[in-house]
Image (cartoon, rainbow, N blue to C red):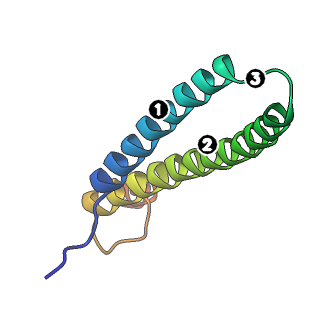
Amino acid sequence: MSTRPTTLDAEQTMGRIQTDLCVLQRQLHQLHVTAPLEGPLAGQFRASRRRWFEVEYQAKSAMMLSRQALAMLNMFTSTSREDPGCTVPSSVRSESSSA
Protein backbone atom coordinates (compact mmCIF):
# COMPACT_ATOMS: atom_id res chain seq x y z
CA MET A 1 0.00 0.00 0.00
CA SER A 2 1.53 3.29 -1.06
CA THR A 3 1.12 6.50 0.84
CA ARG A 4 0.65 9.95 -0.58
CA PRO A 5 3.92 11.93 -0.84
CA THR A 6 4.26 14.88 1.50
CA THR A 7 5.94 18.24 1.06
CA LEU A 8 8.77 16.88 3.20
CA ASP A 9 9.26 14.06 0.67
CA ALA A 10 9.41 16.63 -2.13
CA GLU A 11 11.89 18.79 -0.20
CA GLN A 12 14.11 15.76 0.43
CA THR A 13 13.99 14.83 -3.25
CA MET A 14 14.92 18.39 -4.23
CA GLY A 15 17.82 18.24 -1.78
CA ARG A 16 19.10 15.03 -3.36
CA ILE A 17 18.79 16.55 -6.84
CA GLN A 18 20.68 19.65 -5.69
CA THR A 19 23.43 17.43 -4.25
CA ASP A 20 23.64 15.47 -7.50
CA LEU A 21 23.88 18.72 -9.47
CA CYS A 22 26.77 19.87 -7.28
CA VAL A 23 28.59 16.56 -7.81
CA LEU A 24 28.10 16.84 -11.57
CA GLN A 25 29.37 20.43 -11.53
CA ARG A 26 32.55 19.32 -9.74
CA GLN A 27 33.04 16.50 -12.23
CA LEU A 28 32.52 18.87 -15.15
CA HIS A 29 35.05 21.28 -13.68
CA GLN A 30 37.56 18.45 -13.28
CA LEU A 31 37.00 17.41 -16.90
CA HIS A 32 37.45 21.00 -17.99
CA VAL A 33 40.75 21.29 -16.13
CA THR A 34 42.12 18.08 -17.63
CA ALA A 35 40.62 18.37 -21.14
CA PRO A 36 42.83 18.65 -24.20
CA LEU A 37 43.01 22.15 -25.68
CA GLU A 38 43.64 21.03 -29.24
CA GLY A 39 42.66 18.22 -31.56
CA PRO A 40 39.41 16.38 -32.27
CA LEU A 41 38.70 15.62 -28.61
CA ALA A 42 38.78 19.31 -27.74
CA GLY A 43 35.91 20.03 -30.14
CA GLN A 44 33.89 17.10 -28.82
CA PHE A 45 34.52 18.23 -25.28
CA ARG A 46 33.34 21.77 -26.03
CA ALA A 47 30.14 20.42 -27.61
CA SER A 48 29.52 18.16 -24.61
CA ARG A 49 30.17 21.01 -22.21
CA ARG A 50 27.70 23.20 -24.09
CA ARG A 51 25.03 20.50 -23.82
CA TRP A 52 25.79 20.10 -20.12
CA PHE A 53 25.30 23.82 -19.49
CA GLU A 54 21.95 23.67 -21.30
CA VAL A 55 20.86 20.72 -19.16
CA GLU A 56 22.16 22.40 -16.01
CA TYR A 57 20.18 25.55 -16.80
CA GLN A 58 17.01 23.52 -17.35
CA ALA A 59 17.57 21.58 -14.12
CA LYS A 60 18.09 24.77 -12.12
CA SER A 61 14.97 26.28 -13.68
CA ALA A 62 13.01 23.17 -12.73
CA MET A 63 14.37 23.37 -9.17
CA MET A 64 13.30 27.00 -8.91
CA LEU A 65 9.79 26.17 -10.16
CA SER A 66 9.64 23.22 -7.74
CA ARG A 67 10.56 25.47 -4.82
CA GLN A 68 7.85 27.93 -5.85
CA ALA A 69 5.31 25.11 -6.11
CA LEU A 70 6.34 23.77 -2.69
CA ALA A 71 6.01 27.22 -1.15
CA MET A 72 2.52 27.55 -2.60
CA LEU A 73 1.61 24.06 -1.40
CA ASN A 74 2.95 24.77 2.09
CA MET A 75 0.97 28.01 2.20
CA PHE A 76 -2.18 26.17 1.07
CA THR A 77 -1.79 23.30 3.53
CA SER A 78 -1.05 25.64 6.45
CA THR A 79 -4.15 27.75 5.73
CA SER A 80 -6.35 24.68 5.18
CA ARG A 81 -5.19 23.25 8.54
CA GLU A 82 -6.15 26.48 10.28
CA ASP A 83 -9.65 26.51 8.83
CA PRO A 84 -10.62 23.25 7.10
CA GLY A 85 -13.48 23.49 4.64
CA CYS A 86 -13.95 27.23 4.90
CA THR A 87 -13.05 29.52 2.02
CA VAL A 88 -13.82 32.83 3.75
CA PRO A 89 -10.61 34.64 4.75
CA SER A 90 -10.22 35.15 8.50
CA SER A 91 -10.03 38.94 8.06
CA VAL A 92 -13.50 38.94 6.50
CA ARG A 93 -14.91 36.72 9.26
CA SER A 94 -13.52 38.97 12.00
CA GLU A 95 -15.00 42.06 10.35
CA SER A 96 -18.45 40.46 10.06
CA SER A 97 -18.42 39.23 13.67
CA SER A 98 -17.53 42.68 15.02
CA ALA A 99 -20.41 44.36 13.15
Closer mark to the observer between disc 1 and disc 3? 3
> Percent position (x, y) of residue 77?
34, 59
Q: What residue did someone put label 2 on?
A: 60
Q: Secondary structure at mark 1?
A: helix
Whether 96 is drawn above or below 35: the answer is: below
From mark 1 to mark 3, how far is it between C-alphas? 22 Å
Task: Residue 36: give its label.
Answer: 3
From mark 2 to mark 3, how far is it between C-alphas? 28 Å
Residue 37 horizontal side relative to residue 24, left or right:
right
- N-terminal label among 2 and 1: 1
Q: Label 3 is placed on what type of residue?
A: Pro
Considering depth in this image, is 44 or 28 the residue closer to the camera?
44
Residue in view at x 86 percent, y 29 percent: 39
> Percent position (x, y) of residue 83?
28, 63
Whether 71 is drawn above or below 93: the answer is: above
Q: Secondary structure at mark 3?
A: loop
> Percent position (x, y) of residue 91?
44, 52
> Percent position (x, y) of residue 40?
85, 36
Residue 91 horizontal side relative to residue 78, left or right:
right
Residue in view at x 62 percent, y 26 percent: 31
Q: What residue did someone put label 1 on?
A: 23
Q: Quadrant of the N terminus?
A: bottom left
Considering depth in this image, is 34 or 96 the residue closer to the camera?
34
